[in-house]
Structures are given as C-alpha cells and as structure tokens.
Image (tube, helix red, strand yellow):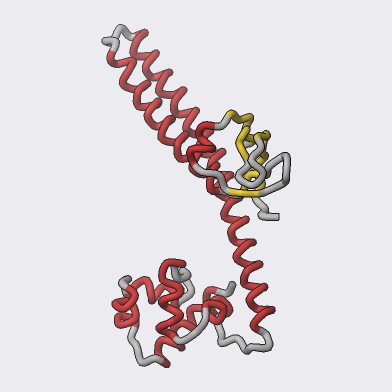
C-alpha cells in the first residue's frame, strides 16, 4: 500500500466533504495531528477508526486502502490485492517481533549475569549481604519482565501448526504459558481437532 497516495486521497475526500483537519479529528475523537500524519503519508488510520472515517469521507475501505475510488469492474481484483498486501505486512511484522524476542532474551540474560557478577564483587569486598541481593534482585526482576513480554510475542506473532490436522491458529496466552516447549515448539491441544501434539511456530497463514 502506498501511504503517500492514501494520504493524498484522504485529504482530497476530506476537502470534498467541506471539512478541515480539526473538524474531521473532532468527529473521530482523535487529534488533528493524527489526521495530518495520515494526509502526509507518515502513518495509516488505525483499524478502530477506519470504518467511521470511510463513512465520513463517503468511500469504502477498499477505496481507502487503494488510495483512489475503485470502479466496480476492478473492485474484486483490488480487494484481493489489498488483502494480499495486508497478509504480507503482517508476516513481515511477525518476523520482526520474533527477531525482537530473540534479541531481548539475549540482552536480558546478559544483564542478569552482569548483575550477579556485580553482587559477587560486592561480596568479595566484604560488603553486607544485602549488597549482593540488590543487584541480583534487579537482574531477576528485569529477566522476568522480559520473559513475560517475550511470551506475549510468542503468542501473537505468527501461528502454531497442529501436527495432527495441520490447522493454524493463534493460541491463548494461558495455553502458551502453560505448555511444555522446546524452543518455539509447544505441546498444546488443537482447537480444531481437539488432539494434543508438538506444534511448531509458523509466520505464514498458509
């Protein structure tokens, strides 16, 4: 999707409806700065306001994502193109999230070891016992926080594939957190066939 083209289209349709950026923003319950970002191609409207925005601009969501009014002859083709583009964008975002999970995990472990080393140094210097536990506790707190964040990424990024029926789905946070795992492969119950299996992570929906 061409964000600059979409931004120009939003500005064009807003003006056609006789609205200023401020008026459109007030009707949507957002700031005029957000509208300005859309129209300059720096960001896209959030899904929570997209339908309402299209209604105000007298366009369809497909028109918005194309950055132009789509004729009925081309409507189906352009809809499929937009859906494909959205799928690709999600897959790219999921890959970035999974990479972030790895990086944050490595940094978290290194920080924990560093805090343990600091505490050990204090102990060898004859400092009070609490001088050992303070940095270690700080390291443990950040480690747990990062682990919970990484688990959330593990849940929402991509899909898990049932080894029994091939069904791909996004499990609940509870299912992921309670499951036995080897890396990103987790032993979970498939919501489609109801059987348990070791399910691998996949970024693609198909």
Q: Residue at x 50, y 34 (%)?
A: 177
| 203 on left or right of 147 | right
Image quarter in which the C terminus is found:
bottom right
Image coordinates for residue 98, horizontal then vertical, percent: 58, 45
Image coordinates for residue 30, horizontal then vertical, percent: 32, 71
Where on the picture, by quarter, is residue 23?
A: bottom left
Image coordinates for residue 81, horizontal then vertical, percent: 66, 73
Q: Residue at x 53, y 73 (%)?
A: 3
Image quarter in which the N terminus is found:
bottom right
| 190 on left or right of 34 | right
Q: Residue at x 37, y 71 (%)?
A: 34
Q: Nearer the viewer, residue 50 or 2?
A: 50
Q: Nearer the viewer, residue 96 or 28?
A: 28
Residue lying at the far front of the rendered structure: 194
Q: Nearer the viewer, residue 77 or 65?
A: 77
Q: Residue at x 63, y 29 (%)?
A: 182
Relative to 195, does residue 56 appear above or below in the rendering?
Answer: below
| 38 on left or right of 185 | left
Relative to 133, does residue 99 appear above or below in the rendering?
Answer: below
User: How many labels were placed on the picture?
Assistant: 0
Image coordinates for residue 65, horizontal then vertical, percent: 55, 76
Relative to 125, does residue 1 appear above or below in the rendering?
Answer: below
């Amino acid at each position: 999707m061409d964000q600059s083209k979409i931004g120009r289209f939003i500005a064009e349709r807003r003006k056609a409806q006789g609205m200023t950026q401020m008026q459109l923003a007030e009707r949507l319950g957002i700031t005029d700065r957000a509208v300005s970002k859309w129209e300059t191609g720096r960001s896209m409207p959030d899904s929570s306001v997209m339908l309402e925005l299209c209604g105000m601009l007298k366009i369809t969501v497909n028109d918005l994502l194309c950055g132009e009014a789509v004729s009925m002859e081309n409507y189906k083709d352009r809809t499929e193109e937009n859906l494909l583009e959205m799928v690709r964008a999600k897959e790219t975002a999921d890959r970035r999230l999974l990479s972030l999970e790895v990086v944050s995990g490595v940094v978290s472990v290194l920080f924990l070891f560093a805090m343990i080393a600091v505490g050990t140094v204090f102990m060898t210097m004859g400092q009070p016992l609490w001088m050992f536990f303070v940095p270690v506790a700080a390291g443990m707190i950040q480690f747990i926080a990062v682990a919970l964040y990484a688990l959330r990424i593990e849940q929402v990024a991509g899909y898990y594939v049932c080894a029994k029926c091939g069904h791909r789905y996004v499990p609940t946070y509870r299912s992921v957190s309670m499951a036995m795992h080897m890396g990103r492969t987790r032993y979970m119950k498939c919501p489609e066939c109801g059987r348990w299996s070791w399910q691998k992570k996949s970024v693609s929906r198909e």
